Image: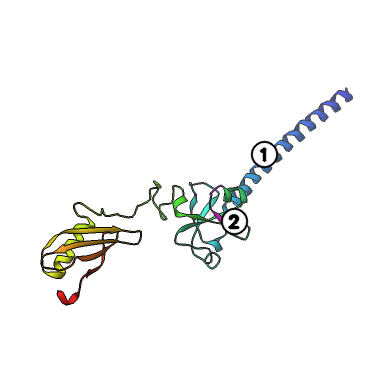
Amino acid sequence: MRTILLAGAMAAFSLGACGAQSDDADMAADTTDDDGGAVAAMAIPESLAPFGSGYPDPGDACRNLGESPATSNYLDDSAVLVGCPDEASAEALGGRIVGNVEGVRIVSVPMGDANVGMGENGPTGGATSAATTIPVRGANSLETRCADRVAAETGASVAGTNRIEESEAAIAIYVNVDGASAPWRCLANRDGSISEVMFTGDEGAL
């Protein structure tokens, strides 16, 4: 009888010990999770002026970096500055790793490559604005703008275009003016501006 009671007591003690170990394991797991979250939250130090909830998407490990003594040497108007807690997340951005501060990889991501979620630094659609190019001939063209400028300069009527010479630097447009012994020339730019208007003949004949 004593043997049976002793065996029962030992079995109860074993079950209690197992339950305690299980509770300890659960507490340890909770502590690990909490610590992991704290580490993630502290991954980018305040000295780097981090902002936003993640880059390129909310919740991501990398974050946008603002201006501070630690980041001032890396800031570039043509790029987004990002801080990542490890090499893998930094390389995944496709930018250039320019430094390492307190274990954080500093990445410069060109504006043209910046991902969505960058409302402060560029359009989310990834569209880029192309430079406006004015046609050489036709309505509201460099040719008509030249004629208007020459007419205003001379006070005479422009009879028509003599010739047009195009180059990478500028476009030379020669126009005939009533009463002039030689054409007038405009140096026009493809953005629509006229940088110079001059008479190509002997100015004494004007």
Q: Spatial distance from mark 1 to mark 2, Cα to Cα?
A: 34 Å
Which residue shows up at 18% across the image and 67% down it?
182
Residue 109 lies in the magenta-colored region: no
Q: Is residue 3 visible?
A: yes
Residue closer to the observer: 5 or 77 = 77
- Which segment is the magenta one? 92-96
Mark 2 lies on residue: 105
Residue closer to the observer: 67 or 128 = 128
**Amino acid found under the numbered disc labelled 2:** Arg
Q: Furthest residue to the bottom?
A: 204
What kind of secondary structure does the magenta stretch mostly adopt?
A: loop
* Dot 1 alpha-carbon crowd within 10 angstroms: few under 14, some 14 to 19, many 20 or more: few
Instruction: Indicate which label's residue lies in the foreground, 1 or 2.
Output: 2
Which residue shows up at 49% across the image and 48% down it?
56
**Numbered tag placed on residue 138 in the rendering:** none
Q: Quadrant of residue 18?
A: top right
Which residue shows up at 85% across the image and 26% down it?
7
Of the residues under marks 1 and 2, which one precedes in the sequence?
A: 1
**Amino acid found under the numbered disc labelled 1:** Asp
Which residue shows up at 78% across the image and 30% down it?
12
Q: Left or right: where does residue 79 sit relative to residue 189?
A: right
* The N terminus: image quadrant: top right
Q: Secondary structure at mark 1?
A: helix
Mark 1 lies on residue: 26
Residue 68, x across and y down, in percent? 51, 66
